[in-house]
Image (spheres, grey):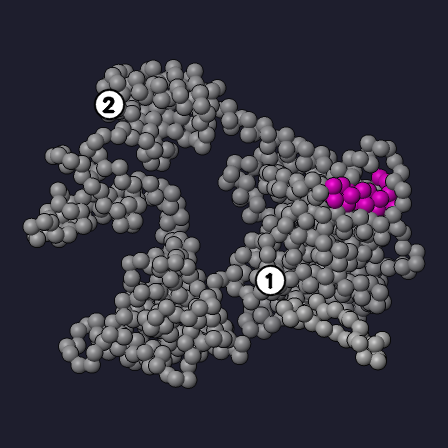
């Protein structure tokens, strides 16, 4: 702070600024800056939003300006006030059916009023902080709702595609379709076909030219191509008609039955809120999968997002715009274009306003058939095969089908209510339906329980268990994820009584995994992962018989250390050898019992189709480096090459050892991998050996191999190359510095291989550097330098950072 006090001089009217001795200097005003990534992303989103907004307005039967109003308000209001920085809001295809029905029933001005009231309802829900509740809706209901809306859109727009006029309902459109197809308009069909061809072919243009062309959105190319063709050929077609903004209709007082208006407000609120909140969650997932960014994007605040969507609907409805919600197509384009803040979505709204005011003559050249074809394609894509496979896998296909048919035949709200009812009925059926069977094979009694074990199944379970004779060995297989208290007590009482009478009980899951077993003093209680955790079982005091579960090699120290007499205990090298073999056998047995049933289908598919890995992963042979764990990959994902020190010999220097070069050639030329990653790690023994190596001495195989790491030593010793920084700190020691430098050096060796160099020139391959800190369990990716060189040196401008 600063204060002004008058001086005692003659000029006492002039104040003098005095800074207290401990006050901070004045803070300079912050300058508003827009990142280049946000600017480019906003342009991409605008080019997608413009034709889609007009097409959705056309599909609803609303004034075409209303689509532009909703896009602008969604970009400016929802983006500024919402809680999802990168989600783009605007007129959504998921609201097309709802809005079209409201316009047909109540008229346009009342529909705008309903949009305002829905926005007020969203503001109330946001203030109550109930946004997370919307995520409790079953995905099968959401996917079914979107699929039903997509079918409705596609059938209605098909009439415009062939040159006709759609009816008010799906059933009417289906009944009128044969007559419409008998009187098609050739010009409309040709423009629609051209639009669809460009829309689907544009993203599939191959090669380097295709990568450049694909930066232009396919929707813009499709509509622009049809517009240009129609203008050049002089086709007479219905085209976009944007009346003067002075005659644009704004919201009026709602007119109609109170219950009908309330149901309409509830429907718009439900669809807008659920679609926007699920979209915000999806955007968070897209951002999390994006490569490391210089600017981190925070996770979505769902309650704030609901408030932002409510404010946007209030403004859009008041200004005569369509209802606003988060839009998946534009949001994914925004994320993929590299946007880093909400500035990108706000700029896209500004561009929509400019286009609505200055580009009216150009927009009025667009054929309506082209916009209808674009929206029809969006509707078809809303029926996602991926969603159908997902709900089928989770046994919710009935909920999906009922919701879809309900939306198509009855309406969105009615279809959602039907879907919720069926979902509740299915859940209750699964909870109450339990199958219990009993059979005997080889003297062993198998009791199988299929379904959830609740108090409703206790009488049947009790009758079945009492059929088992005393003293028998019983395998009780439980295939369910829930057991209530009554069932648990009944099962425990019977088990205790059966064991007391000399019987044995083994509880397993459906795949045979033992989930409970009798605890005996001679049995080791280790789990299958204990060797990985470096655990050793301690034998109990006193002599005990050898057990199949014992992991110790004998009565001596389990780690083979020396006893008090200075000699190795009975679990020395021979004991450890036996223990290792025993652990290997147990590991194989555990795999066959637990893991094999889960992966057998996937491995059978890979066996039929052959391997198709996406990348070559070259890393060290260190036993602590588990490639599948640190890359979250599975069978068929990685083509892995491991050697001491993750070294890549230069071409022509292998001296009879072509194994690494052969693997590189096979991966690039035969398997056509898309990327190669060289991964180093902390505490690498090979790098320690390089640092501690003394000249001369016997040339062992290890020394001869490590000579391929000498260029890394020279690179680290070069005075013109600064040392690396990892996550903002300097390397802990020279070994870690060499580990980092070695990754970059081996990438240079990799680029020297002919197959790699050729693939890089063709743009078919990417190279990545990676570093894994074992002690911190943290993986780091090498960041590209600003000058475009991928891997020149690991300097201050190329920190290794956490991936975003």
Residue 613 appears in the picture as rendered: no
For the residue pair 544 and 288, the one nearer the viewer reads as 544
Residue 345, position as x, y percentages in the image: 70, 60
Q: Is residue 109 above or below residue 26?
A: above
Q: Which residues are magenta?
A: 105-124
Point 51% across, 28% down: residue: 430
Residue at (63, 33) in percent of width and height = 420
Whether residue 367 sits left or right of residue 331 in the image: it is right
Residue that label 1 marks: 336
The local secondary structure at tag 2 comes to loop
C-alpha span from label 2 to label 1 = 62 Å
Q: Measuring 34% from the left and 43% from the top, which residue is drawn there?
A: 595
Eye-nearest disc, 2 or 1: 1
Q: Residue 262 vs residue 397: left or right? A: right
Horizontally, is 549 left or right of 231 in the view? left
Q: Per the image, is 119 magenta?
A: yes
Residue 373 point in image, percent of width and height = 72, 56
Q: Main secondary structure of the magenta part?
A: helix
Residue extending farthest right? 247
Q: Quadrant of the N terminus?
A: bottom right
């Amino acid at each position: 702070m600063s204060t002004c006090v008058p001086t005692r001089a003659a000029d006492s009217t002039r104040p003098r600024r005095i800074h207290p001795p401990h006050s901070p200097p004045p803070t300079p005003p912050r300058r508003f800056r827009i990142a280049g990534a946000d600017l480019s992303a906003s342009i991409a989103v605008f080019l997608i939003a413009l034709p889609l907004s007009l097409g959705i307005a056309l599909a609803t039967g609303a004034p075409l300006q209303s689509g532009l109003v909703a896009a602008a308000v969604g970009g400016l209001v929802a983006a500024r006030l919402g809680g999802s920085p990168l989600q783009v809001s605007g007129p959504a295809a998921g609201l097309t059916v709802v809005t079209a029905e409201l316009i047909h029933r109540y008229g346009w001005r009342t529909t705008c009023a309903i949009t305002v009231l829905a926005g007020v309802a969203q503001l109330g829900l946001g203030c109550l902080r109930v946004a997370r509740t919307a995520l409790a809706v079953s995905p099968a209901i959401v996917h079914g709702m979107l699929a039903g809306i997509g079918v409705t859109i596609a059938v209605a727009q098909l009439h415009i595609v062939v040159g006709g006029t759609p009816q008010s309902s799906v059933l009417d459109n289906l009944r009128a379709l044969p007559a419409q197809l008998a009187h098609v308009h050739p010009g409309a069909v040709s423009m629609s076909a051209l639009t669809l061809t460009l829309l689907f072919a544009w993203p599939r243009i191959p090669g380097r030219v295709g990568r450049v062309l694909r930066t232009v959105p396919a929707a813009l190319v499709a509509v622009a191509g049809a517009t240009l063709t129609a203008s050049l050929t002089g086709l007479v077609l219905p085209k976009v008609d944007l009346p003067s903004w002075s005659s644009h209709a704004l919201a009026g007082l709602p007119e109609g039955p109170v219950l009908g208006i309330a149901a309409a407000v509830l429907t718009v609120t439900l669809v807008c809120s659920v679609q926007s909140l699920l979209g915000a969650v999806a955007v968070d997932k897209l951002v999390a999968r994006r490569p490391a960014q210089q600017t981190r994007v925070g996770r979505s605040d769902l309650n704030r997002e609901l408030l932002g969507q409510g404010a946007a609907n209030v403004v859009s409805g008041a200004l005569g715009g369509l209802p606003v919600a988060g839009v998946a197509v534009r949001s994914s384009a925004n994320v993929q274009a590299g946007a880093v803040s909400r500035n990108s979505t706000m700029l896209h709204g500004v561009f929509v306003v400019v286009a609505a005011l200055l580009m009216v003559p150009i927009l009025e050249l667009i054929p309506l058939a082209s916009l209808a074809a674009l929206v029809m394609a969006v509707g078809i894509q809303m029926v996602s095969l991926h969603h159908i496979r997902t709900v089928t896998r989770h046994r919710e296909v009935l909920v999906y089908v009922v919701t879809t048919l309900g939306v198509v035949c009855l309406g969105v709200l009615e279809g959602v209510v039907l879907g919720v009812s069926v979902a509740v009925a299915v859940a209750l059926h699964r909870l109450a339906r339990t199958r219990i069977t009993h059979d005997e094979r080889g003297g062993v009694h198998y009791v199988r329980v299929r379904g959830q074990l609740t108090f409703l199944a206790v009488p049947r379970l009790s009758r079945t268990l009492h059929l088992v004779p005393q003293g028998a060995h019983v395998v009780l297989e439980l295939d369910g994820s829930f057991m209530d208290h009554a069932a648990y007590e009944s099962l425990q009482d019977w088990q205790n009584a059966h064991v007391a009478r000399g019987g044995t009980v083994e509880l397993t899951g459906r795949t045979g995994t033992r989930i409970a077993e009798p605890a005996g003093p001679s049995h080791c209680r280790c789990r299958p992962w204990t060797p990985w955790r470096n655990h050793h079982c301690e034998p109990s005091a006193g002599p005990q018989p050898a057990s199949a579960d014992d992991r110790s090699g004998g009565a001596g120290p389990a780690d083979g250390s020396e006893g008090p007499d200075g000699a190795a205990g009975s679990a020395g090298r021979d004991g450890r050898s036996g223990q290792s073999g025993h652990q290997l056998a147990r590991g194989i047995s555990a795999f066959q019992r637990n893991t094999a049933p889960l992966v057998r289908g996937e491995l059978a598919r890979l066996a039929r189709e052959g391997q198709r890995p996406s990348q070559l992963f070259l890393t060290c042979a260190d036993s602590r480096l588990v490639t599948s764990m640190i890359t979250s990959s599975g069978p068929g994902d990685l083509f892995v090459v491991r050697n001491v020190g993750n070294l890549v010999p230069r071409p022509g220097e292998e001296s009879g050892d072509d194994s690494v070069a052969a693997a590189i050639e096979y991966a690039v030329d035969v398997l056509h991998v898309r990327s190669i990653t060289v991964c180093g790690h902390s505490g690498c023994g090979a790098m320690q050996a390089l640092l501690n190596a003394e000249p001369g001495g016997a040339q062992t195989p290890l020394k001869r191999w490590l000579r391929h790491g000498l260029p890394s030593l020279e690179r680290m010793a070069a005075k013109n190359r600064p040392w690396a920084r990892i996550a903002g700190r300097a390397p802990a020691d020279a070994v870690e510095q060499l580990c980092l430098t070695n990754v970059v050096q081996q990438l240079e060796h990799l680029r020297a291989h002919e197959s790699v160099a050729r693939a890089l020139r063709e743009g078919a391959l990417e190279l990545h550097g990676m570093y894994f800190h074992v002690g911190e369990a943290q993986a780091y990716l090498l960041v590209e330098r600003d000058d475009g060189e991928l891997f020149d040196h690991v300097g201050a401008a190329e920190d290794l950072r956490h991936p975003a």
